[in-house]
Amino acid sequence: MTQTSFVPLHPQPVEEDPLELMDEIEQLKAEHDAVLLAHFYVNGEIQDIADFTGDSLKLARDAVTVTNSTIVFAGVHFMAESAKILNPAKRVLIPDLLAGCSLAESCPADKLAAYQAELRQAGHDFETVAYINTSAAVKSLCDWIVTSGNAREIIDRVPAGKEILFVPDQHLGRYLSEVTGRPMILWPGSCMVHEVFSVQDLLRAKRNNPGSVVLAHPECPKPILDVSDVVGGTERMRKYVASVSTPTIFLVATEANMIHPLSLAAPQHTYIPVPGIMASDGTTCACNKCPHMSRNTLRAVRDCLKTGQPEIQWQPYFDKAQAVLQKSLLQ
Ligand code: CIZ
């Protein structure tokens, strides 16, 4: 009988010890004068070894305070791009260049420019407010940039006589229009993670967890927000749970990795990711995990520090985007 050796169809990457990877990252950071920034939506193990964690607003503000020559941004592309735009002299690395964003993809710069021209032609006198989840090319076409953390404050700065074109998240725009009382023309984009929550499952979860409190991100559609108790971005969620001392069950309608910083900020509570409780076999469903954020692995962080790639390169439209980002996030 001939001996055949087993060849896997797709070679699997060799498992690496997470603790060794963490040590290697620490060493490479020191060697390359690098600092690691991690968004609340990346894997907890990366948040644990980061120098700074937070939402886009906090991380953009942290990035301008660092003295290191290299910034590694564990997040998605538009976040690393914003860090580069605000720190042109620094080298900005992103662990995986393919870490994109469904919202940013829903609003290409050429389509936005055409729509703005159409609106002007039709006599609209407006300013364009973009959610930070947009490409730098889109930011360069806008008057203001908002994050979930500063949106109300920025919308108050848009002159009262102007209409507002809000891009790209229709749900966040609708919510902001309601809370600020400013009518808005909405771009029809949405986030693939926040779109998947089901009202039925959320109501069932509330019934199964008497006394629970629902935290929802304003990127969720209105029917979810209508049955939620606290609506806010990730930093607001974190501050909210920390302000409650009585152990509480929180049902969390946002990216599932957010449970990590919430548990660190207020370990006395129980956190249940909203879609997780609806899986019929009792396991956690992964549909509330952003596939782009998940590209940030310890191995990818290590490799980008080791090779200096992928690096965010300065683009001609960054100059215009810089002025908008600075006035919106730093002033
Ligand atoms: O602002 C951010 O970082 C995003 C995208 C969401 C949030 O609420 O933190």
Image: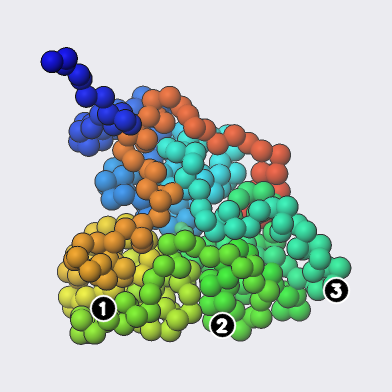
Q: In this view, does 213 lie above or below 314?
A: below
| Total tally of numbered discs in the picture | 3
Q: Find numbered disc 2 in the image and state the secondary structure of the residue it sits on.
A: helix
Q: Are marks 2 and 1 in contact (CB under 8 Å)?
A: no
Please identify the quarter of the rendering in which residue 20 is found: top left
Q: Earlier in the sequence, mark 3 or mark 2?
A: 3
Q: Identify residue type, mark 3.
A: Gly
| Residue located beneath label 1 in the image | 205
User: What is the number of the mark on residue 123?
Assistant: 3
Residue 116 image label = none
Marks 1 and 3 sit apart, C-alpha to C-alpha, by 48 Å
Disc 1 crowd, CA 10 A, few/some/many (<14, 14-19, 20+): many
Q: Left or right: 75 with respect to 115? A: left
Residue on which the image places disc 2: 178
Left or right: 19 in relation to 218? left
Residue 230 percent coordinates (x, y): 37, 78
Amino acid residing under circle 1: Ala
231 vs 113: above or below: below
Position of the C terminus, as image quadrant, is: bottom right
**From mark 2 to mark 1, how far is it between C-alphas?**
27 Å
Q: In which quarter of the image is the N terminus?
A: top left
Label 1: element kind: helix
Question: In the image, what residue occupies the spot 49% across and 32% down?
Answer: 310
Sequence-first disc among 2 and 1: 2
Relative image position of residue 39 (x, y in whole percent): 40, 52
Residue 36 in percent (x, y) is at 38, 40
Q: Which residue is drawn at 80% across and 72% down?
A: 125
